[in-house]
Amino acid sequence: MSRTMLRVSVTAGLLILGVVIGLIFQNIWLGLLLAAIVWLGWFLGYESRRGNNAGVNDEDHGIEL
């Protein structure tokens, strides 16, 4: 699976999950907001791991994700 397809799949999956959670809580916007927060965390971690920067704590460059 290519990187682009993985990103699109995860984004679509989290969007659908957000709608379902929103329906459970009877507030679609809350579900979409929670899905967006989870997606942002996943995306930052994925890109950091892909760039070999995961867990880097170099005092010269500050703390990086």
Image (spheres, helix red, strand yellow):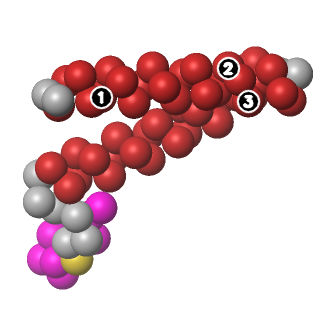
Along the line of sight, the residue nearer the viewer: 36 or 19: 19
Image point (22%, 77%), residue name: 57
Q: Residue furthest front?
A: 1
Image point (88%, 22%), residue name: 26
Quadrant that contains the N terminus? top left
The residue identified by callout 3 is 21
Q: Disc 3 vs disc 2: Cβ atoms closer than 8 Å?
A: yes
Image point (71%, 23%), residue name: 20
Q: How many marks?
A: 3
Amino acid of disc 2: Val
Q: Is residue 23 above or below residue 54?
A: above
Q: Main structural element of the magenta stretch: helix, strand or loop?
A: loop
> Is residue 12 toward the left or the right of residue 55 in the image?
right
The residue identified by callout 2 is 19
The residue identified by callout 1 is 7
Q: Was residue 15 drawn as part of the magenta stretch in this picture?
A: no
Badge 1 marks a residue whose secondary structure is helix
Q: Which residues are drawn in magenta?
A: 58-65
